[in-house]
Amino acid sequence: MKKTILRSKCMALVALVMLVSCGKKDSDGSLLLPLTDSIADTPEANLQAMSLQSGEPLYLIGAGLYDITGPAAEVGMMGFAETDQKTEGIYMRLWSRAFVIGDGAKRVVFVSADLGMIFQSVKQGVSRKIAADPDLAPYYNEANVLLSATHTHSGPGGYSHYFMYNVTTMGFIRENYEVIVDGIYRSIKLAHQNVAPGRIFVNQGDLANASMNRSPIAYENNPASERSQYASNVDTKMTLLRLQRQNGTDIGMINWFAVHPTSVGPTNKLIGGDNKGLASYFFEKDGGTSYTADSTFVAAFAQSNAGDVSPNLWGPADGVHDYERENIIADRQYDKARELFDTATVRLEGPIDFRHKHVNMYNTFVDSVGKSTCKAAMGASFSAGSTEDNAVSLDLFDEGVTVDSVEWNENSRNAFLHSFLSGFLSIAWPSTLDPAYVACHEKKPILIPTGEASFDGNPWTPPIIPFQIVQIGQLKIAAVPAEITTMAGRRLRNAVKRNADDIVVVAGLSNAYTSYVTTPEEYALQHYEGASTQFGPNTLPAYEQEFAKLADSLQAGTSVSPGPVPPDLTDYQTTLQTGVVFDDVPWFKNFGDIVEQPATSYNRGAIAKAVFWGGHPKNDPLIRSSYGDIERLVNGQWITVLRDNDPATIYRWQRDGIAYSKVTVSVDTSDLAPGTYRIRHRGHWKSGWTGAIKSYQGVSRNFTVL
C-alpha cells in the first residue's frame, strides 16, 4: 500500500512539473497542455492536488452529449444504399457522445456518434471548429480526437465529401453535414467544460447471444490453426469503462462490442440509432440523463470489429418485426453492460498518450508480403450486399464472384454486364483497364474503379486515410477508418498489443470511411466484405504494419511522421436535392391545426395519435428540442413526459400534394400512468412569398389513459 501511494504521489509530481514546464509540443510531437496565467486555477492543478491528497491515481474526466439529428424528411438514408429509403420521421434522435480524459500532461477525446459512418469530411469539419475555438484549440486537434460511428443504418446521409458515398442521396446534403459537425463539436465542448478529477474502471465480459457471423464461409477460409484459438466466429467480448468522479458520482460509461446496428432494415424510413442507440437510451435512463442539460450522465455503446457481424439472429430484417428485434438486441447489450458496469473494480492507471498519422493507401508497400496496396476499387460482389443479413434490391452479381469463378467467366448475364460495364468505364476512364491496376486486386473482379474514376479530378473514395491509437493507461484504442471483420480485428489487436497487461480495443468506423477490411484469406473468396475491401488483398497487412508503427512509437516515446495531408473537398460538393420551396395549408387552416384528433380515451397498451397540418422538417431540425411531445395534466399543470427522442413516441411526416405536410405524432401508452394527456406538435413553415421561416405549434384535445 505504501508503494502504491508513493508511486501515485511521484506520478502526480512528475505530471505537475510537466505542466509547468511545457510549451506547445512534447518531444514526440504530440500536443501538451498550455500554460495559463494561474496554474492553480486549472483542472490539471486540481487533479494533481487531489491525487496528492488522496494518494490514488486520478484522471481528468468529462462527458458531453449533443443532438446530431439531421433532416427528418426526404433525405436518403445512409447504410443500405437504397435510393427509395428516404427519411419520413423520427423513432429516436441521434446523439454525439463525447468523453475527455487527461492525466495532467495530455488529453484525449473519444466520441461515439449515432451515425452510419464518420467520413473524413466530418473529422475535418470538427477539427476546423476546434481550431477556431480559443477554449478548445490549446488542448485538442486531429491527433488526439477520435471520432467513431455506431454504424446505424437509420440516419440521413449525404455528409461525405466523396462521390461514392453520396450517390444514393443525390449529392451532398449540407444541412445534414452542418448538424453533424456542429453537434459533435458541441458535445466535445461540453465534455471539456465538465472536466474534473475522477477515476476510470475497466471490465470485460462475454455476450454470446447478440450477434452472428453473416459471412461464415469467408471466415472459415482463415487458417484452422488460427480459428482454433477462438471459441466463436464472432467477437463476443465487451470491453467497458466506468467513469466516476472522485466523490463517487458516475458521469459516464463507454463500451465496445462488435455488432451491426442493422436490426432495422431497408424498408424503414424513421431516424433512429438502432440497437446501439436504444441500448444507450436504456442505460442513460438509468443514469438520470437529461438530453437538454449541459452536464449529464452519458453512456456510449461504441462500435468495434463488426464488419461481418449481424444482429439478425432470426434472419434478415423483414419490416414487420424490426423494432421488436432491435429491442431484444439492445436489451442484451444493455444487460451485459449493466453487469460489467456494476462489477468493475480494475482501475485504468498510467499515462494518457496518442499517435496519429495519415497514409496514402494507394501505394503502401507492405514489408511482410513484399507487395503494395492498390488504388481503390469495389468488386463485383459488392453489388450483392450482405445476402445473409440484408441484401440489396438491385443485386447485379452474387456474393463470391472472383476473377476465376464460373459466375464471372461463363454466366452469360454476368459476362454481358462485365463487358458492358468495362466498355463504359474504359471510355470514360481508360486507366481502369490498366493491367497493373486489375492485377493488383488479384481475385477481385473490378466493378467500380473508385480510385481511377473521377468527375472533378478527385477519386470517388479517399486515398489518404488516418491511422490513430489512443492510450488511456493500459487501454489502447485503435481507430480503424473502415468496417473491419472479426478475424481481421483480432489480428490488428495482436499487432498493437505490446505489454502483457495491455487491453486493446478496435474502434471501427473511426475518423474516416473506406468500406471494409478483411483478412487476405477472406478477401480471396470475394464475399460482400471482401469485394468491399477497397485497397486489395494486402489491405489488412498494411493496416497491421502501420498500426504496429504507432504502437512501437507509443512504447518507445518517439514521434511519428504525420504523413500526407488529405485533401479538403469542401469546395467540390454538389447536390441534386432541392430545398424547401415553400409550405402551405388548405384554405381556412393554420399550421398546427388538427387533421385528426386522438380518441377520448385509451386502454393502456393502445397507440394514441394525433395528425396535424405542419411544415417541412427541413426548415429546422429542432436540435435539443422535439417535433412531438406527450404532456400529462398533473395538479392543474401540463408536464412533458415524453418527447420525440423517446422510443414510445413516433413522429411521422407525409407530403400531401405539392406543399402540404401532414404530421402524425403517436405514442405507445403501455408505460403511461393512468391520467389525462394531450399531444403537442411543434415545427417551422416557410413562406412562399418572402422565404421567411416561422415557428408554429399545435395541441390536440385531451385524452384519458385508463
Image (tube, rainbow, N blue to C red):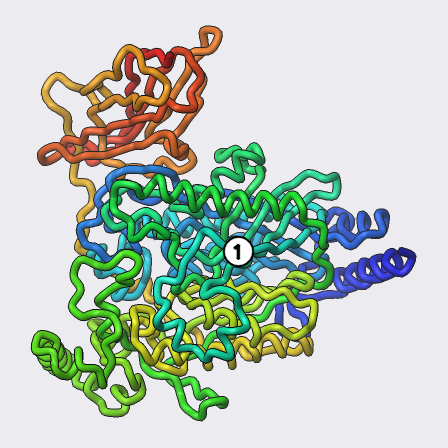
Residue furthest toward the right?
Answer: 2
504 relative to 97, above or below: below
Q: Name the image quarter holding residue 538.
A: bottom left
Side (left or right) of 288 relative to 38: left
Tell me, yes or no, if residue 395 can be seen here: yes
Is 627 placed left or right of 593 in the picture? right
Mark 1 is surrounded, within 10 Å at the Cα level, by few (under 14), some (14 to 19) or many (20 or more) other residues, namely many
Residue 567 or residue 538, whichever sits in front: 538
Residue 514 image point, x, y percent? 36, 69
Q: Please state which amino acid type lies under the numbered disc 1.
A: Trp
Q: How many marks?
A: 1
Q: Which residue is at 65% across, 43% downward?
A: 342
Q: Secondary structure at mark 1?
A: strand
Q: Nearer the viewer, residue 12 or 570?
A: 12
126 or 432, which is in the foreground? 432
Dividing the picture into quadrants, the one containing residue 564 is: bottom left
Q: Residue furthest top?
A: 636
| Residue 138 visible in this rendered orientation of the protein | no
Please determine whether, in this image, residue 418 is positioned above or below residue 397: below
Image side of residue 56 versus residue 525, left or right = right
Q: Can you give x and y, in whole percent of width and height, for residue 673 in the image?
A: 44, 17
From this view, report whether residue 598 is shown above or below residue 155: above
Q: Which residue is mark 1?
A: 256
In the picture, which quadrant includes the C terminus? top left
x, y (%) of residue 643?
Answer: 40, 29
Residue at 15%, 19% in the rendered image: 589
- Identified at 14% across, 79% down, the residue is 425
Which quadrant is home to the N terminus? bottom right
Residue 512, position in %: x, y?
41, 65
Q: In this rendered view, identify the residue nearer to me: 412 or 489.
A: 412
